[in-house]
Amino acid sequence: MKTHDVRHVEFVADSIPHLHDSDSTTKMMWSVVLSLVPLALAACWVHGFHAVWILSSSIGVAVLTERLFDRFRGNPATIQDGSACVTGMLLALSLPYRLPWWMPALGSVVAIGLAKKAFGGLGANPVNPALLGRLFLQLIQPSFFWAGLDSIDGLTAATPLMRFRIAREILVNTAAHPADRITDATVTVSELYGSVTDGFVVRYAACLGETSMLLLLFAAGFLLYRRVIGWKIPLAAIVSSGLLFWVIGGAEGLFSGNPLFQLSTGGLVFAVFLMATDPVTSPVRAKDRLIFGAGCGILTVIFRLWGPHPEGVGYAVVIMNLIHTVRQRRWLRSPGNRLDRQERMNPGNDEKKA
Amino acid sequence: MPRMTFRGGVHPPSRKSETWNLPITAAPLPEKVILPLEHSSEFHYRLLVELGDQVRTGQSVAEAEKPTPFVCHASVSGRITSIGPCPDVSGRNVRSITIESDGHDRWHRHPSPPGDPSILSAPELLERIRDAGVAGTGDDGRPAYLKLSRCMNQKNRIVLLNGMESEPFLAGEHRMLVESTAEILTGLRIWMQTLGVRRAKIAVPREDREAIRKLHKTLGRAKTISVVPLDSKYPMGSEFQLVEALTGLKASPAKLGADCGIFTETVATALATAEAVMARKPFVERVVTVAGDGVREPRNLKVRIGTPIRELVACCGGFTSDRIRLIVGGPMTGPSVHSDRIPVTKNTCGILAFAVTGLPAVSEKPCISCGRCWDCCPMRLSPRKIEHWILHGRSERALSAGLDACILCGSCGYVCPSKRKLTSRIAEEKASQSAKKARSPRQDGA
């Protein structure tokens, strides 16, 4: 054994601490992807080529957009950190299986380009990119998202939420409707309430991410175990929306709602576990997280019961994202000492001094 | 009721197995020792010797009058070969005394015999501790008697012995607890005698069964000192967190435990106190763990203060690679240094060497505000907020976000999934702030 001569040793300095946790942002991103693979495979198995196309084009275009943005801005490539892949995957799973072929790709461009890269990339996006992509597509082609209004080639039935909404409107205002429609509505509601647990393992649902509640909860459990997502936001959102749906969401007056029905449809579980928990756009402190989650839940109830669309969790999360971003910017500006007018007008001066 | 733990903290792998069972061995006498005279920048020493003088081990070579009296002792006998700038741990050149050993280790005897310490009064004990140069061995190396006299002014006094050693790799305090149990308890009793306290607590890691058994055996039926096994969460060995765990008091750099009458010191200081009072032996040697995959034979060494790192590594079989990351202290808080000529000081608890292979793999990613740094911060700060202000060059806002309260434990830098250099940025900012304060002491109130 040769001992190195002390004189020839080169000393490499490093910053403290010299030990680092083995977990990393990249690992967190890829574990999100990994957790969603079973769900994506189930969607492909149920929906066939449609799902395969949506998943591959959405993920592919998301990664490509990220790469092109880095290329044209002269930044180092960031696609290997997995965040673009996560965005593409979340977007694909939040889309209905029947869409014009170009829509997933357009959604990805909006998600990565507009919501994420335009603000400075990972860590700087004000809202969840995948959610913004989905809401954009929903605005330009709404008919595909609540197919009950305009079913496509006769195959797609109205979503359960849409059917519930129409039935509830009739039941709430019984005076304005004939008796046979009221009977129909009552039957629809009881049928919907009865079918809550039917699609727990596999369901022929509208959105890819709703294919299997079991696999979705499995993914959420894995991410909770890996500490990629926290439990406070989903819990607060589910408890607040569940309580409100029970109290005011029913068709026959107060306390007649079925929270399980509302929770099992419309992507609520998917959104609160995988969209609302995005660390960049959600708060850090325990109390703020509970408020954030409760806000998502309450807004969802409001949008679903009185909004123009049957589902509302997407808008609820985006609004809470924006509220959080504004609060965040406030601490960036004033932790106890507000920027004076001079500084606000010439932000560059201060940096030069430092 | 104390909670026996503190908020936050991390669980780095302990990696102590290499040196855990190695008995403390005395390192051979160093060829030369380097004694820096500015270990914490506020001390200004007056030289008591001249270039070329012969000195004996334990003889005072310099003393500080301001801000408090303190003494620096020669740690070997020999000739003073240089008085001038030498690099210290921070990389700066500081005024230091270099003594070339004559190899005989002739000791300087204190003129008066130790006598019976149990009849000494508190001021006499304090004087002995001060004159022996006993310093805090875990933190910034301030004189131990300062902390003691601060506690004496308080009404309710508590004495805690810190045997936690929560940094990975280090095992020196564990070895001291096992091998010199009686002396450590003597040191603890001297503190209790000085402060007039009847009860004390010893905090040891729950896993350290050997030390707990030894302590119980040595304590016998004495009920005045209790052994408290604690979870070895990092940084339990930090004074603030230990005080929080054992007393419930949330101490911070602005409100030290000593200001509330809580005296906390480490095992190595207790040992030095016992020697200072019982035998009037100055603090000239301490136990240092040399470990890591960069040295051939990791060891727990008893070394003279001022021994250059290179001599310690040589007596551990040398480096294993020609590219080495050399750390003075523990892996969480110890800075890495560019040279192995740097001397061991009174607060050096370990020397760690790691072989560097290839390029550093750790690259910084943007903060995704996952909140883990905030979760683990034992001082309840938001490290990312402080880092944000430092990066934007707004020191005043970094200060209002709690820069001063940071104890630089390294938990945030350890846990960050984006591998951001949170701790080292905060450390740099703290250093530049204190340098600014030292330059203009009158303006810091403005």
Image (cartoon, coloured by chain):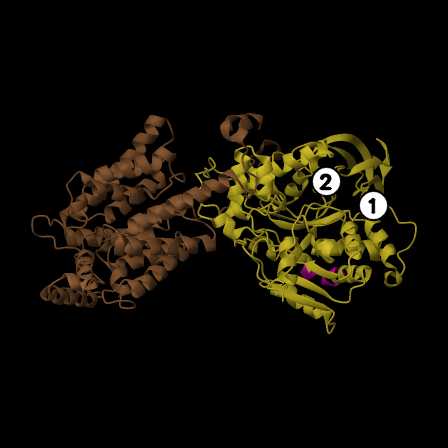
Q: Does residue B355 show up?
A: no
Q: Which residue is found at the position 77% from the left and 35% from the top? A: B98
Q: Residue at x 22, y 38 (%)?
A: A105
Task: Give the quarter of the image for residue B42.
Answer: top right
In the picture as drawn, the residue positioned furthest to the bottom comes out as B221
Camera-side residue: B260 or B349? B260
Which of these two is toward me, A200 or B279?
A200
The residues bearing labels 1 and 2 have C-alpha atoms spaced at a distance of: 21 Å
Mark found first going from the N terminus, 1 or 2: 2
> Can residue A155 be seen from the camera position used here?
yes
**Is B45 in the magenta?**
no
Which secondary structure lies at badge 1? loop
The tint chain B carries is yellow
For discs 1 and 2, the disc positioned in front in the rendered view: 2
Q: Amino acid at mark 1?
A: Gly
Query: Can you name the residue that lies furthest to the front here?
Result: A175
Q: Which mark is residue B40?
A: 2
Image location of residue B45, percent across then percent down: 81, 37
Amino acid at dot 2: Ser
User: Which chain gets the brown colouring?
Assistant: A
The residue sitting at 67% across, 66% down in the picture is: B227
- From the viewer's side, name the closer residue of B395 and A92: B395
Task: Name the residue carrying label 1.
Answer: B58
Q: Is residue A112 left or right of residue B183?
A: left
**Neighbourhood count class around disc 2 (C-alpha, 10 Å): few under 14, some 14–19, many 20 upward:** few
Looking at the image, residue A12 sits to the left or right of residue B369; the answer is: right
User: Which residue does the image show at 73% across and 37% down from the upper left?
Assistant: B41
In the image, B219: left or right of A241? right
Residue B229, image x, y percentages: 62, 65
Mark 1, chain letter? B
What stretch of residues is rendered in magenta? B177-184
